[in-house]
Amino acid sequence: MSALTLVVSIGIAVSAFCWIASLLTKDTSWVDRIWSIAPVCYVWVFAAHAGLADARLTVMAVLVTLWGARLTFNFARKGGYSGTEDYRWAVLRGRMRPAAFQAFNLFFIVIFQNLLLVLITLPALTTLEHPRPFGVLDAIVAILFLLFLAGETIADQQQWNFHRRKAERAAKGEAPEAQFLTGGLFRVSRHPNFFFEQAQWWMIAVFGILALGGIPWTVIGAFLLSLLFIGSTFFTESITRSKHPEYAEYQARVSPIIPWFPRVRA
């Protein structure tokens, strides 16, 4: 069995599990729970088919494993594995007819997102098919990946600290200092964790570019991931703005995803 066939087979099995589990539990966050796990498995499949002899592929697998470990930890501490459904799906369920939401669940939440999890790892397929020596540019890309990983870790920790303080004040019956985070990395980007997440997968795509010596079709995964995050940003912010009208002023000052100098309001 080829590496790609094995990865696709695993992806189909994971998709079936997520869909059946969502129907049995009436919880549509099963894809969220495997989001940080499945890509790690896929990249290691490609690395294993090279006999762990391709330095570029092995480095890619190690980096993606670090990405997965960090994301799994952050998701777990927020209760993601304890049956807590993503609040956005609950909002969307309330806006759609039951049949329409189930179709959305099958085709977007389950099929599209699991397909995307396969696609973002396919630069490893390009690397497997076009083995080249690991060079200086590869080392630079690996370092950039680690820097982006550190950036996302910091952003998530800042968000975690903010919500912990907010919950502590609420438990004491006190009003929160703010309804949403605007300090730290969130001063230069409304979603710095989104930026760093995408940047890491673009680095994985660049490994494929370096292996091929050109732009392979497998960059489509990183491209589609960016589109997904853009859509997610619009949807998430529409919910936040409906709860907190003052969020519009924050939107007017701060870059949505790419970190940049905040605008000064007159």
Image (cartoon, rainbow, N blue to C red):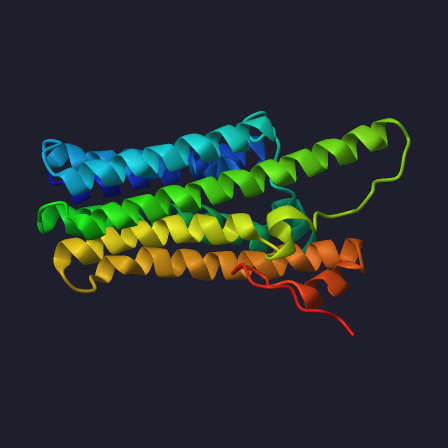
Q: Is residue 6 visible?
A: no
> Is 215 situated left or right of 65 in this image?
left
- Image position, residue 135 (x, y; %): 15, 48
Look at the picture and state if 152 lies above or below 220: above
Outermost residue, bottom side: 266
Q: Quadrant of residue 247?
A: bottom right
> Is 69 situated left or right of 251 in this image?
left
Q: How many marks?
A: 0
Look at the picture and state if 221 lies above or below 214: above
- Image position, residue 55 (x, y; %): 15, 38
Q: Residue at the spot x=70%, y=38% of the render?
A: 162
- Image position, residue 85 (x, y; %): 61, 36
Depth check, front residue: 137 or 106 = 137
Instruction: Name the quarter where the N terminus is drawn.
Output: top left
- Image position, residue 159 (x, y; %): 64, 40
Depth check, front residue: 96 or 125 = 125
Q: Residue at the spot x=54%, y=40% of the render?
A: 154
Instruction: Name the quarter where the C terminus is drawn.
Output: bottom right
Outermost residue, top side: 82
Depth check, front residue: 197 or 42 = 197
Look at the picture and state if 243 lies above or below 44: below
